[in-house]
Image (tube, grey):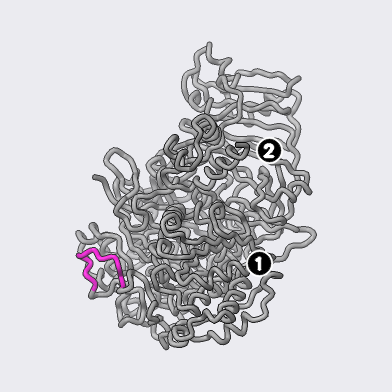
Amino acid sequence: MGVRTTCPYCGVGCGVIATPDNRVVADPAHPANLGRLCSKGAALAETLDDSGRLLHPVVEGARVDWDTALDRVADTFSRTIAEHGPDSVAFYVSGQCLTEDYYVANKLMKGFIGSANIDTNSRLCMSSSVAGHVRAFGADVVPGTYDDLEEADLVVLVGSNLAWCHPVLFQRLQAARATRGTKLVVLDPRRTASCEDADLHLQLAVGSDVALFAGLLDHLDQAGAIDQAWAGTHTTGLASALEAARGVDVAGITGLEPAAIAAFYALFTRSERTVTVYSQGVNQSSSGTDKVNAIVNVHLATGRIGRPGAGPFSVTGQPNAMGGREVGGLANQLAAHMRFDQPGAVERVGRFWGAPDIATSPGLKAIDLFEAVADGRVRALWIICTNPADSMPRSDLVRAALRDCPFVVVSDIWPTDTTALATVILPAAGWGERDGTVTNSERRITRQRPFRTAPGSARPDWWMLAEVGRRMGWAEAFDWDGPAAVFREHAALTAFENGGTRPLDLGGLAEVSDAAYDAMPPQQWPLPADHRASQGASQGTLQGGRLFAQGGFPTEDGRARIVPTTWRPPASTRSARFPFWLNTGRVRDQWHTMTRTGLVPRLSQHVPEPRASLHPADASALGLAAGGLVRLTTPHGVMVMRAEIDPGQQVGEVFVPMHWTDAFSSAGPIDRLVGAAVDPLSGQPELKATPLALEPAPVHWRGLLLHTDAVRPPDCTWSRIRLEHGHALDLSGAEALPADPVVYARTLMAAGDAEMMEMADPSRGVWRYAALRGGRLVACLYLTSGSQALPSPQALAALLAVPIADAARRSVLAGGGQVQASEQAVCACFSIGLQTISTAIIEQRLTSVADIGAALKAGTNCGSCIPELRDILKRQLAPA
């Protein structure tokens, strides 16, 4: 049958089955996805490539055994603490860690090293939600479930491109819309795929969400739609929040037409079953916490929380962002949702752990942590399962800090720009090899089970951390025989002296046996001690897994707080020098810094390179054409990439994907350009509003390079995608080619002493080269300084690394017989391109997305390409 486990990508937490024939398919029984997968999840089997893996511990560039590496880590940490104090060391971990890994890291740092300097890349995506939840509810709790999307009359997406970033949830929503007529409103400065089928899209100004929701709160009051009885019984602060909301110039701040605002307010007012889904467009802001509370306020004021089809809903970006928050993965948290500012909490956790030197105050949040590395306050750092050299704002500063830090340990699966700066590299077990649990966005704990053996001597992160804890002198506290034992301790701590005061209660699993842990079904917390885990119940509460319908908030008086919020603009300001806003985010088929998805050729077909998307009016004013090069400049750096003309952008705003690093493109990582302004409460950086300048960059030639190795060409703008037997690189040059480019071609091709073939036509501005070693093609390069078309990488990919007969050599230089542009991919799940779809619509007279699915299968898996299929249909059918 296969092994049931969970997808390692977003916070939806989809169940998958790894089958004996090396396939990974959707789990039809998992309550999060019910048999659906997105394009990335559908390609998981294609990421199980160990050829580039980290296989052995390395210390200062030399391969060593585990004992040597772990002794070095433990000894250096101990010596650093002795000389400089516990705050001179830090951990930086990840929402891709399993809960058990997270728990051990938090216990080691906060409990026994005695510092709270452990933070996580979840700080970059979810910490404003955490702060907003704590302010409103008294604890970091998401009250609703995914079922609410299917039971709502109105779903509002705020700063969330659900169609691309959480496609499985979007398909559940779309199915509900088809059966029950659920209305959809999208609040987003960009027109994204999620807007294509929406009833209303409000393209509000960057950072204006607080004003819009303050106006909504005031409107609800004026319309008599506030549930005075519920709010009066279960909340405090309504009067103050209403006072702060009155008189806000909503239209002026948001830039929206009053009629559009009125339409949204009227729809919200009359829709008793309303779910407001929000994500990074809300969180990644210098006012992110206020945005969260402004959203939560309208739900608390109307009592639309914890009921079927009603509530505020934060969807997480990573597979275990929620689990990390449960065990105290953020620097300002204690374990088990306890906090440093709660009376008795520090003493309680310290007593449970037997840790007399437990940290007593919050540690450094991510931005501050790397600044402390840069200025020498942190002298020993352990980075686990994340790549901050690419993903942190001001990533050049982060790289410099890591380069100068006396001791950097990195645990990872593949080499990254971060491992390149490490003193000690520890090879980690990856997805499919790790054993533990994750918690998704609806509080559902699911097992992540191993179905393959870790290559080389790779080991789980929890084991590495526990071994270091033992070697630092705390053997008894870190004496676990497997992840089940770690989970039992975590579950027991959530229930320890809880007494119903903390919703996070896993007491029912505190004594789960190893066998029951192995077989544990997906289930939502709270799971208190009277819960029977053996029955596999997944409800968690009496309200269908929902919380707070009848109040009972974990505050001193049991009431939620309706928090007065005041709009403020982004922390940085646009100017004559920097007149644009830079916005960063995800694309459909890639994940984080592409260490996994970058291995899969078909996932690079839809968006093959980083592009700066800008409005046609801005492009026209700058003299930029689609596909031309544009230079992006912020106060933090400069880079060049291709321009994309997108009428879905607002004038004055530019969107660039976050995924490409300088392993995949000369224009990566985009976080080199992003500033480090943070929300004062959450510490979350503002990744959606960096002041930016644009100008055209000259293009004197273009090229296509195919290579068996992942080369990085010098002195040009380039981006790389993976092919089955090598790599394809798109090249552009800002300087004219030399009169005889063969020497430059050898440099670009990194061909060394390979046999070179050449075909040149300078009068037409065309040069073609091929490099063979031992009769096998190792690289081919096609250059043009004119308007000549370049070959299709797909037409040439099969020739790489295979013997080339003498008779076929001219065919290689001719571009494999096909000198044409490659087909733009649309459906990544089934590798179906634009031309194929367009031709089928015309020739087979297809008139609907369902027709396309029946004819080609496009759109029948994850459905994230359905908005694009609708757009293609409109364009093809418009003349008819």
The N terminus appears in which quarter of the rendering?
top left
- Tell me: 340 left or right of 287: left
Question: Mark 1 is on which residue type?
Answer: Ala
Depth check: give the residue in front, 822 or 462. 822
Residue receiving disc 1: 259
Query: Callout 2: 10 Å neighbours few (<14), some, many (20+)?
Result: few
Give the labeled residue for mark 2: 715
Residue 362, position in %: x, y? 49, 75
Residue at x-position 67% and y-position 68%: 258
- Horizontal and vertical percent position of residue 619: 74, 47
Closer mark to the observer between disc 1 and disc 2: 1
Q: Return the x and y of residue 369 as percentages of the image width and height.
A: 54, 66
Mark 2: which amino acid?
Answer: Asp
| Image position of 39 with respect to 180: above or below | above
Instruction: Give how far across and how far down residue 766 sits, in percent.
Output: 69, 23
What secondary structure is found at the residue carrying circle 1? Answer: helix
